[in-house]
Every structure is written in structure tokens, then in C-alpha cells.
Amino acid sequence: MAATTWMTIANRAESALDGSILAGDGTLDVTTGEGALFPAAFDFMINVGDDAQGYELMLCTGRAGDTLTVTRAQEGDGALPFTDATDVKLRVTKLYVTNLQDAINNIEDGTNQIVGNVSALNIGAASGAGTGQIKAEAAGAVQHSILSGGAGDYMSIGLGRAAIEMDVVVVAGNDQFFTGTVAGDGVIDVDDNTKELFLGVGSGGPQMRIDNTTVIIPVALTVGGGYGSTGVSISAAGVIQADGAITTDDDLTVGG
């Protein structure tokens, strides 16, 4: 969509030429002291003329006191010479109305205003209660993607309350793991080349790697009767050992 030409207006901005002008002149003077009747911001349209000499729409692109800088012969008019004391009036012209109609139509349509024109977008919510909605697109409809930026960037999706209770981080490239300084940072990464699933918690590399044949855990694995209890463990060196008393709820199966 072409940029809209927004122009300034002022109520009852009317004066008269202070001296005659020729068809090729790019400036004109209005009656002494009446330049201030016209807008200080630009651009705006003026209509110069009378029934005897004819009329010409001009685009005013600047004003210094009572002197207006103009672009002649606007909206299909021809440039004309005018005598001293000819009327100079600011007018709302067809171009004003057309630009307004175009802007409204584009907002209603939406595509010209939004699609292809947003390169970066931040959406914030004020404090207080609110509701949100996630809509699943129907089969065959346009789908939505959220992608990270360049190398070294990542995208995170937080689910939970003020202190994020669940964090899914998609890293920028293969084998690039999210390194955070806050305890509880987590990463879930699927390598597009090897199809391996990596799970990690905290800073550093993956804590678990899963592919279609193996599960690799580079630290000791403890199998216990409950969270925090001791039982049977497999060390990082592959040694099966007892970590304290083994009870009936401590089960370990190795093999198919």
C-alpha cells in the first residue's frame, strides 16, 4: 500500500495575495500578519483565484511568516498568473477525502496494514486479571510458526505463574544448549539431523539423550522406592550397586 499523504488543516484559514504572482512562481505572500492563520505544519492545500481569473489548487510545503512555499497545479489544475489581492484559502480537497477513505478501507481489510509489514512485535499486558485464548487452526488452514532469530538466539515458552514453573526452550542450532544462570532452567531439543531427543536441566549440556535405539544418561542413575529415597543405582561407569537398604519397592529391570 502506498503511503497515505496526511495533510494539515485549519479552520477559516483565508487571506489574499500580497502582490501578484506568475504561473511559474514557487512562493507567494499573503496579507501582512495573516500567514499565522495557516498551519505551522505541512503539507496543506490552498485554493488561489476568483471567478474572473480562474482557480488553482496549490500544495503548500512550507511557510515562513507570511510567505508560503507552494507546488503549483495540483489535482489536475493548471498553473495560472494571479493579481494582487486575489483570494488565498485553505480548502479540504478531494485528495484529503480520498486518503481518508483509503486509510479506513485498509484498516477494515487488514491485509495491507498488517501482513508483510511487521518485522518485530512485542505484546505486553498490564498488571491485573486478564484472559487469553489460543485457537487451533482447522485442518488445511494457515498455520502459525514462532521462530527464533539468528545464531545464538533461542525461543522460550513459559507456562506457569510469576515464577516460571515450566520452561520449554528451542535452541538456535544442533548441539547448542541453553545455558542459564537461574536454577531450574530447562531445555527440550530435538536434533533435526539425528532425530535425537535431548533433555537438560540447568546450565551446560544435556542430561539425557534418547534416540530410536538407546537412552544415554551421562550421570549415575538411581532407581528408588520414591523421590529422594535410596535404592539401586547404575553409576556413570556402568556399575550396578546398592545405595543403602534395598526394600521390596526397589525394582530394576535391565534387558528386553
Image (spheres, rainbow, N blue to C red):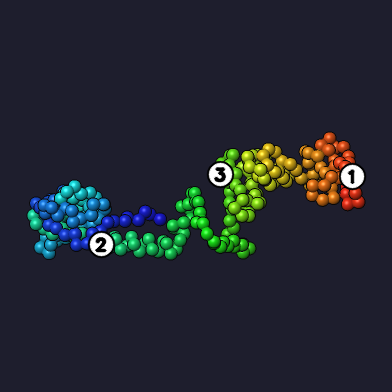
On screen, residue 191 versus residue 88, left or right, reads right
> Where in the figure is residue 229, as x and y percent of width and height?
82, 47
Q: Gap in Å between the C-alphas at discs 1 and 2? A: 92 Å
Q: Secondary structure at mark 1?
A: loop
Give the label, 1 or 2, closer to the camera.
Answer: 1
Q: Amino acid at mark 1?
A: Ala
Q: Is residue 208 visible?
A: yes
The kind of secondary structure element at disc 2 is loop
Q: Is label 2 in contact with label 3 (beta carbons under 8 Å)?
A: no
Could you tell me if the residues under marks 1 and 2 are in contact, i.e. CB atoms within 8 Å?
Answer: no
* Cα–Cα span, label 2 and label 3: 46 Å
Residue 98 — which label? none
Crowding around mark 1 (Cα neighbors within 10 Å: few <14, some 14 to 19, many 20+) is few
Between disc 2 and disc 3, the foreground one is 3
Q: Which residue is mark 2?
A: 93
Q: Position of residue 72 (x, y in %)?
A: 21, 52
Which of the pair 183/119 is nearer the observer?
183
Residue at image mark 3 = 149
Q: What's the residue type where badge 2 is placed?
A: Thr
What residue is drawn where x is 65% and y is 49%?
168
* Residue 245 badge: 1
Nearest to N terminus: mark 3 or mark 1: 3
Nearer the observer, 204 or 94: 204
Q: Can residue 24 be seen in the rendering of this structure?
A: no
Amino acid type of the residue that numbered disc 3 sits on in the rendered structure: Gly
Q: Residue sitting at 89 percent across and 44 percent down?
A: 245
Image quarter where the N terminus lies is bottom left
Position of residue 77 in the picture relative to residue 152 (left or right):
left
